[in-house]
Amino acid sequence: MLTRGVASMSVALALLTGMPTIAVADEPVEIDFERGGSGSSADVVLKPKDRGDSGGESGGSPSGSTIAVKTPGKSTCTHLGEKIDCSSSFGVWSQAKECWVQRVSPQPREDDPIWSGHDDGAIYWCTPPHTSGVTIGGRHMFWAPSGDAAGAPVLVDPVTLAEEAIERMRLVAPRIGMTPLDPEAPLLVGVDAWLWLDDRGPRGYGPITRSASAGSVSVRATAKVTKVVWDLGDGTRFTCRSAGTEWTPERGTGPSPTCGHRYELPSTGVGDGTYTVRATAHWRVDWTGAGQSGRITFTLTGARPVTVTELQVLQTG
């Protein structure tokens, strides 16, 4: 008679190995920070960087890989122990002056007393924050040198420089490591699948540090993955706090010590007959510069298919 059951350990090991996966070159992503207005958070749009100018592939992403979009929390500065936006419609926050600074436009007339006899530099607005609806100190204008001269106000938003530093990291979307190693090889129901990130280097997992400067202002940013959220395609979703453990033949069968899954149902009745496995790396970027600090978060997602099937065993006698 015809019965169904899980494979023996030797068959499972052979299926876990499969054929070696063809390596895919890291695909850097370009991170566009599209602001939704003054002082607001930006949607972080993560898309493949066009490599057409360098002779590589233009557009697209690695086979089986997708790019995700996420909105980060606001990057903030601190004033009197309270968090405030580092930039707003009133300009860029100045820790030294304890107000948002913005160049006055148009500039006052040359004979305006605000110039205090100066014939160089520029006039700026100083707008302090509100506490419980009360303005501290009041909005006022002041004179200061322009450009990179000593005493010139910092009008470069450090958040913008932090975003530039992130772009210089050339981060890559996750490449999923999974048993079976060959995405086209089947995985048997009841056999433990190991899950890991193939790229656990600085660009794929962190930490990685880059800096960006504009004039005398410099920002240093450090990025790292804080967690990986796995979606196995069968309704299972869980979080691993590490990059996972890579499977090798000498490890044999059995569950992963760090991150794995066991399918209980075959994928034959799902769409094209495969489950789509997705790994979403949650990145956190901490930056400092211009007397300020902040945090930017975003995600990158990689995907690959897996066919889950049941072994048909013919028993006689």
Image: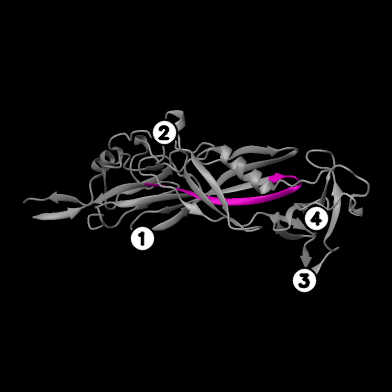
Residue 176 left/right relative to 35: left
Residue 125 is tagged as: 4
In x, y percent, where is residue 236?
38, 58
Q: Residue furthest top?
A: 55
Q: Are marks 2 and 3 in contact (CB under 8 Å)?
A: no
Residue 33 left/right relative to 134: left
In x, y percent, where is residue 106?
77, 53
How packed mark 1 is, by other alpha carbons closer than 10 Å (few <14, some 14-19, many 20 or more), is few
Q: Mark 4 or 3 closer to N-term?
A: 4
Q: Mark 2 or 3 closer to N-term?
A: 2
Q: Between marks 2 and 1, how big is the CA–CA gap? A: 30 Å
Residue 245 quadrant: top left
Q: Residue at x 64, y 46 (%)?
A: 160
Q: Secondary structure at mark 1?
A: loop
Q: Give the residue type that dot 3 points to.
A: Gly
Which residues fall within the magenta stretch? 288-303
Q: Mark 2 or 1 closer to N-term?
A: 2
| Magenta portion: prevailing SS class | strand
**Residue under label 1:** 235
Q: Is 247 part of what is drawn in magenta?
A: no
Q: Give the residue type that dot 1 points to.
A: Gly
Q: Give the residue type that dot 4 points to.
A: Trp
Q: Secondary structure at mark 4?
A: strand
Q: Give the residue type that dot 2 points to.
A: Ala
**Residue under label 3:** 133
Closer to viewer: mark 4 or mark 3: 4
**Residue under label 2:** 25
Q: Between marks 2 and 3, how big is the CA–CA gap? A: 54 Å
Q: Are marks 2 and 1 in contact (CB under 8 Å)?
A: no
Q: Residue at x 70, y 39 (%)?
A: 214
Q: Between marks 1 and 3, how big is the CA–CA gap? A: 48 Å
